[in-house]
Amino acid sequence: MSERVIPIISQPLGNLPIPQALKGPAWAPGQQLLDQRNRPLRDLRISVTDRCNFRCSYCMPKEIFNNDYVYLPHSALLSFEEITRTAQSFIALGVEKLRLTGGEPLLRKNLEVLIAQLAALKTLDGQDLDITLTTNGSLLARKAQALKSAGLKRVTVSLDGLDDEVFKQMNDVDFPVSDVLEGIQAAQAAGLGPIKVNMVVKRGTNEQEILPMARYFKGKGIALRFIEYMDVGATNGWRMNEVMPSADILKLLQSEMALTPLQATQAGETAERWGYLNEQGVHDLSLGEIGFISSVTKAFCSDCNRARLTTEGQLYLCLFASQGYDLKALVRSELDQSALTQAIAAIWSQRDDRYSELRVSEPASDKASTPSGAKRKVEMSYIGG
């Protein structure tokens, strides 16, 4: 199948000023950087392209993101060197994990070069960075080995069903499930693991695929994660009655499978983890695991340690943010590395985002809703997953 690049428009919602005018440095080397809710900075999501070859209804619906939309010129994108320089400052502030996203990140030409540059960096304690990538899997079969050779550690693959008709309805470009499964197998063979597979569950569209997905991936050494359909941006027409709560998904799975809750592996982990029990009722690691990301019904803002960098250098501190900070102007200025790090530290130190907690605290409604007084949010296709 030939690559089909569908252009999308960048929709930044305006920039907040870089808080460089604070009295004194916001952070000193060796000091732990915390935001206003005492959350450290550990995870940076980097969007490397504003293009995608899928038209998933929950992210880039075709009726909105059609061929009339324009995408960013190449000169507007952060170069690989600029991304690496920015990452260096985040690492100095405590970041240990880098996740490359999009759009579809594998559409970015020569992405392996960027991965190699990032893989050469080390955490504050001299360890390798956890460098991961989220992909729709469409190009994974042909690129998995090159990604691993460049230094990529793991991949997360988005897959919203095993039935071809359901999956094609979700991706809306007639892309077959078999090609994604082939990509997952190639990633496993290349050693890009442990692999995670993310399924966004949209009630009325693909909930019938929950059990088939769990049956298929059980025993394959893959973590299958169910994600509640989220109100990211405004173009996906989100409605609360299309959300299938994780509690309902768990109940459905338990009607057929014996599961046991697992402890979080690290602070700020977004997924609640469950393991399979074998026939003797004992947790069996070889069977893989199930995860639930429940940002609609169970907010995890209290320990969120993630920041997001868009493909043109806008920094967002929340997936549901309404405004970002223009780091590209700083990166392309004569600002030295230390000053860039201080600027990012100043931004994080003022962070107070807790959108999901505010949404959860308000009455549920069948209508598309956001917390009272909330501003228009950035689109997932622009900010990355």
Image (cartoon, rainbow, N blue to C red):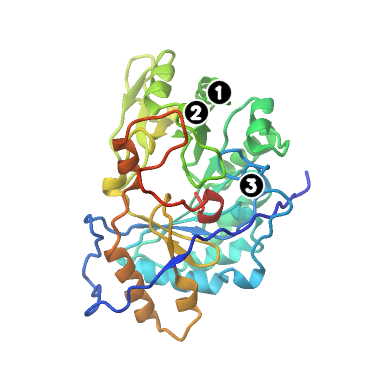
Left or right? Give the position of 157 relative to 292. right
Residue in the picture at 28% in, 64% down: 350
Q: Residues within 10 Å of mark 1 (few under 14, many from 20)?
A: few
Q: Nearer the viewer, mark 1 or mark 3?
A: 1
Q: Which numbered disc flags the more N-terminal residue, 1 or 3? A: 3
Left or right? Give the position of 56 relative to 36. right
* Labels 1 & 3 near each other (Cβ < 8 A): no
- Amino acid marked by disc 2: Glu
- Amino acid marked by disc 1: Gly
Relative to residue 297, is residue 13 depicted above or below? below
Q: Could you give the CA–CA distance between mark 1 and mark 3, rounded to whole angstroms?
A: 29 Å
- Amino acid marked by disc 3: Leu
Q: Which numbered disc flags the more N-terminal residue, 2 or 1? A: 1
Residue in the picture at 38% in, 30% down: 285
In the drawing, what numbered circle is on residue 204? 1
Q: Position of residue 35 (x, y in %)?
A: 26, 60
Left or right? Give the position of 230 relative to 301. right
One can see residue 379 in this view: yes
Q: Position of residue 200 (x, y in %)?
A: 51, 34
The quarter holding residue 369 reads top left
User: Helix, strand or loop at disc 2?
Assistant: helix
Q: Which numbered disc flags the more N-terminal residue, 2 or 3? A: 3
In the drawing, what numbered circle is on residue 140? 3
Q: Which residue is mark 2?
A: 242
Q: Could you give the CA–CA distance between mark 2 and mark 1, rounded to whole angstroms?
A: 7 Å
Relative to residue 307, is residue 192 depicted above or below? above
User: Helix, strand or loop at disc 1?
Assistant: loop
